[in-house]
Image: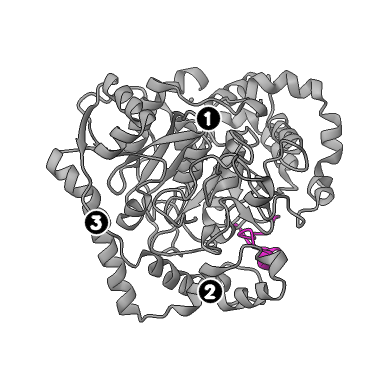
Amino acid sequence: MKRFFLLFLLPAIFSCGNDKNSKEKNTGTLDSLKTEEKFKVLDSENISQDSLWAPFERDLAEFSEKKYEAIKPLIFDKNIPEIQKVIKSGDLTYEELSLFYLYRIKEFDRENELSLNSVISLNPNLLKEAREKDERINNFEENHLITGIPVLLKDNINTQNMATTAGAIALQNNRTEDAFIVEKLKENGALILGKANLSEWAYFFCSECPSGYSAIGGQTLNPYGRMIFDTGGSSSGSAVAVAANLAPVAVGSETSGSILSPSSQNSVVGLKPTIGNLSRGGIVPISSFLDTPGPITKSVIDNAILYSAMTGEDPEDPLSVEVKNTDFNFESTNLVGKRFGAFKQLMEADSLYKRAINDLKNAGAEIVEFEAADIQLENFLRLLSLDMKNDLPEYFENYGDETRFTSVKDIVNFNIEDSITRMPYGQALFEGILRESADSSYLASLKSNLREKGKAYFDLPMREYQLDGILSINNYHAGFAAVAHYPAITVPMGYDDQGAPKGLTFFAKSSQEDKLYQWAYVYEQASIRRKSPKKYK
């Protein structure tokens, strides 16, 4: 079993989806609209509360509010090493940790005035598996730090015991084996908490639907401004659940912005890895050229832990590689001599970005302001349509359950049978997929052309100004990183005048996740901007 070390903490404890635009389509407030105009559908009619909670009824009945309040200071907003330290001391068990999150999900997630609609399903075996971890607690030092930690999975990631729906009624009975990254999580000792809501089909389904809506899960809402601020998409439920302490960590997926967007808009840390560093096997696809899963957490430390627990070469994923170094040493990390590029336009327009740049300067970094090259990603949408037309049938054949669906056309026809329930916002993007066709040589040429442009967008200023990395906001430049196959990480950088969260996003070249984590950690510790949403404490 791979061991993961946070070297500065060793003495203490043994510490996709796709957004349709390069900028989030709605980053402002929605409070000028009437509630019924914001969302056609709010709550889900496809989740049975009785069946969701039946496996935990007796245990939650015995888990009193007094017990919840007693252990809350040991868990709430704590990072994984802090939680593991308390568990090793004997003051907390993995079973109690799991019950804590179940209690909060039941309290906050659905059918009340604070509901967030971030969780679609729960692992019925969670508490049984947690007790098994408690029985083996004496082997703690041989385990990965993810051991016993409940992990929430975006509901386009296959796992046993729960259907993998991609938020779509068409897949509500899609019972599968574990995705490769879920196998790795379990091998490393993680507990699967449940499945998170998402923008249906990873936000490549309807052109006018709000972020975070799915027919299965309903409308995910932002805990920093419920029905006011956009959640971001498509990994909406993953980010919202982590932000509101309904899960310690979660896994999202990204095609172009769908980890970076919801992470930044819900004040959490999100890593979009280099394509291939994490397997895509068993994940409902948009594009085999661009898709990747990635970790969403409240801290950089937790993000690195979760990322390391999912790595491993998958022989069934042609782009998968073995990540050699996941022993991230944060102890001696600093930014002295590191050079970052800052977009002049953002420096002039965004006070939070400007403040974040000053935080980096104070931490020793050198900042070079530059104007981005005028590079357009023509036919990006066409690439997504062509890839999904090919890749979704492959998922059905290789990873899906024995459903009656074999193609995008099958899904389109199924939805038409009951459009009000199955597609209240339409299915314009799926219909667009059906109109696309191209031969393999054209598709290969398109991908090559887009990758060259994406790399040029970052490489030109990096070469000219000898930069280590480039700094942005939220998912503003996610499309370029997507086609370049460059990784990115976003870290909370504060809240605007209306209270909406924003993130400082770092871009680096392929397979430089170790550098991203070091830069992000220093910035996080130098700024400490994240605050939990007030109504969910």
What's the CA distance linking mark 3 and mark 1? 33 Å
Q: Which residue is mark 2?
A: 431
Q: Quadrant of residue 524?
A: top left
Between 475 and 128, the one lying in front of the other is 475
What's the CA distance linking mark 1 and mark 2? 37 Å
Quadrant into which the C terminus falls: top right
Residue 377 visible in image: yes
Estimate the x, y position of residue 520 in percent, counting from the top left: 37, 32
Please give left or right for residue 511 compared with residue 226 in the image.
left
Q: Earlier in the sequence, mark 3 or mark 1?
A: 3
| Amino acid at circle 2 | Glu
Q: Is residue 216 above or below residue 186?
A: below
Residue 3 visible in image: no
Q: Nearer the viewer, mark 1 or mark 2?
A: 1
The residues colored magenta run 162-178
| Amino acid at circle 1 | Gly
